[in-house]
Image: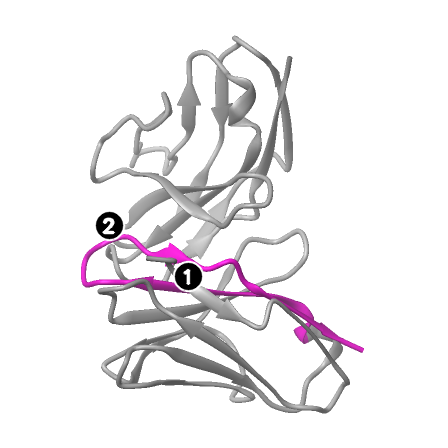
Amino acid sequence: DAGVTQSPTHLIKTRGQQVTLRCSPKSGHDTVSWYQQALGQGPQFIFQYYEEEERQRGNFPDRFSGHQFPNYSSELNVNALLLGDSALYLCASSSNLYEQYFGPGTRLTVT
Amino acid sequence: AQRVTQPEKLLSVFKGAPVELKCNYSYSGSPELFWYVQYSRQRLQLLLRHISRESIKGFTADLNKGETSFHLKKPFAQEEDSAMYYCALSDSGNEKLTFGTGTRLTIIP
C-alpha cells in the first residue's frame, strides 16, 4: 500500500486561473480531509469528505470546492486563484475513529 | 474558537539532554490532543495522541486540563529526533484537526 497519494507534486498557475488537485486515500480509508499549509504555518483545515459529501468545512471561501468519488478518491478545486493561495495542499485520509494519514502534498505556486 | 499555540518556532537541544516542546490550547469542550512530526523529506505523521497514553520513540505528552497544555517530552534527546513537530487538537479522532504553527527541533551532536 503506497499510502495516501497526491497529484501533481508541483503546480504553477497564474492569478485568476482555476486548479484541480487530486488525492487517493490509503487502502481501506473512506474519509478524506484537505488542508492548506502556508509557508511557516501549520496546516489549516479546508474541508472533509465522507460518503461523497462534504461533512465539515473550515473557514475558506466558496472558491474552494471539492468532490469525493465512489472509490473514495477526492479532488480539491480552487477557482479564481489569488497570490495568497500559494501553499502546500495536504490531503489526509482516515477510517472512522482512527488516525488521519497524510499525503506528501501538492505545492501550488500562483504567479 | 479553538486555537493551538506553540510558543517556540525553533528549539536546539544537545544530544542526551532532555527535550520539552510546549503546546497550549484553547477549546471550550473536551478536545482530543495530538502531536504530529515531520522528518526531513518525509510526510506529516502522527507521533502520539493523548487518548492512547502511549510512549512513542521515547516521547510522552500529558494533557493538563487545568493549564490547557499538552507538552511533549523526552528524557534523552537523540539525533534522529531532529524534525518539525506540530501540536494539534480535534473534537474527536476523526474530525478536523487544528494545528499549531510548529516547532523545529534540532538535536546538536
* Residue in front for this viewpoint, A20 or A60: A20
Q: Is residue B100 magenta?
A: no
Looking at the image, tell me whether mark 1 or mark 2 is earlier in sequence order. 1
| Residue A9 in the image, given as x and y percentages of width and height | 60, 67
Q: Which residues are magenta?
A: A85-111
| Residue B91 in the image, given as x and y percentages of width and height | 27, 58
Q: Residue at x 50, y 19 (%)?
A: B19
- Residue hosting label 1: B1
How is the model colour-coded? one colour
Q: Residue at x 49, y 31 (%)?
A: B22
| Residue A11 in the image, given as x and y percentages of width and height | 68, 74
| Residue A26 in the image, given as x and y percentages of width and height | 32, 62
Q: Is residue A38 above or below residue A66?
A: above
The reply to whether the C-beta atoms of the residues labelled 1 and 2 are less than 8 Å apart is no
Q: Amino acid at mark 2?
A: Ser
Q: Residue at x 28, y 52 (%)?
A: A99
